[in-house]
Amino acid sequence: MKRIGFLTSGGDCQSLNATMRGVAKTLYENCKDVEIYGILEGYKGLIYGNYRKMEPIDFTGILTEGGTIIGTSRQPFKKMRTPDENGLDKVEAMKSNYKKWKLDCLVILGGNGTHKTANLLREEGCNVVTLPKTIDNDIWGTDMTFGFQSAVNIATNAIDCIHTTAASHGRVFIVEVMGHKVGWLTLHAGIAGGADIILLPEIPYDIKSVVKALEKRTKEGKRFSILAVAEGAISKEEAALSKKELKAKRKNSPYPSISYQIGKEIEEYTGQEVRITVPGHTQRGGEPCPYDRVLSTRLGAAAGRLILDKKYGYMVGMCDGETVPVPLEEVAGKLKMVDPDTPMIQEAKDLGICFGD
Ligand code: F6P
């Protein structure tokens, strides 16, 4: 008998259910006696003992369903060692439930913070296998995270929709793309959507370069311009500040997000009319795209195989088209950022896309 706990943690994405389905089907198919427990709302469920016994039927018909059938929540890693408001030791509580439920393994689907806690549980003696989930694609040890390509489709569609209205009115449009502290989503959606200017956290921008690129387009007779701006974009001046100074600056900023600051500056420098679109959480919504369905199915199947082989303490990554087990201690705490020298950026620059540097 194998007893496996499933847990989805952090911000959701389109392909969580498809991934759990991949693991579950592999386990049910290859192990006569397996019980799966859905731990509800991420680490919260593990801390407070909330779970639901799952049946094979729960994993059918969910390949195309966005969100997560077992719920999720954000439980910051940095607060894991801090007792809750009732003095409960969260790490001890998680270990105790793991033991009480007699789990052979926890399957944890999540992003960077989730991986830090998963590694902590591994260090504390729990068997853990993890899967790289996030629209940000910023998890170290895998070329691709599930959710990313689905989000690229949505962000690209937002830019596509802006194109016609931008052209009609001759305005400058900014589309602000999610991605937290990294620019993968903006880079891919920006290129796919034909953005003229792409601003990423990894390449601090100079507003004068942005303005120069806009004026060049105007001189060339182009009536509109589109900027794809990462929510984590940062100016050169801001990049020179300490973390604390930047936090204070952003806190006192009159703008709801970086795009509004950039928009205001563009209006002041160029006199052009600027409009801002923030697709926000729509980028995490809806059904997974076919690419993600395949990726999730493969990663899920590989995770199932690891559990069948009793190989614990790994994240399943996708590297050069192959599923690979990556030791959790190597993944936890590392961020996969866009390399400003990557050929993709040079190619984009070669065809005239401005990165604000
Ligand atoms: O990590 C995924 C993500 O969607 C980021 O791109 C974004 O910055 C963040 O989560 C938003 O978090 P929340 O859903 O908690 O507002």
Image: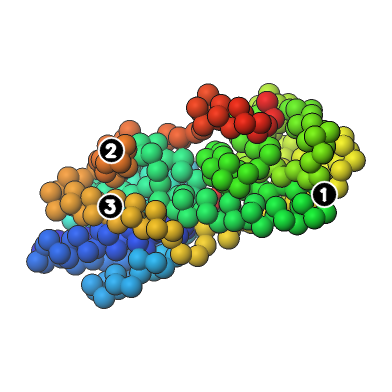
Q: CA distance from mark 3 to mark 2?
A: 15 Å
The answer to which quarter of the image holds residue 14 is bottom left
Can residue 136 be seen here? The reply is yes
Percent from the top left, x then y, of residue 15? 40, 58
Query: Mark 3 or mark 1: which is in front?
Result: 1
Residue drawn at point x = 76 percent, y = 52 percent: 166
Query: Mark 2 or mark 1: which is in front?
Result: 1
The residue at which mark 1 appears reads as 170
Query: Where the C terminus falls, by quadrant?
Result: top right
Query: Where the N terminus falls, by quadrant?
Result: bottom left
The residue at which mark 2 appears reads as 326
The residue at which mark 3 appears reads as 298
Q: Secondary structure at mark 1?
A: loop
Query: Mark 3 or mark 2: which is in front?
Result: 3
Q: Secondary structure at mark 2?
A: strand
**Does residue 24 appear left or right of residue 50 in this picture?**
left
Give the amino acid at mark 1. Gly
Percent from the top left, x then y, of residue 33? 11, 66
Q: Considering only order in the chain, which callout, 2 or 3, is on the residue closer to the N terminus?
A: 3
Can residue 101 be seen here? The reply is no
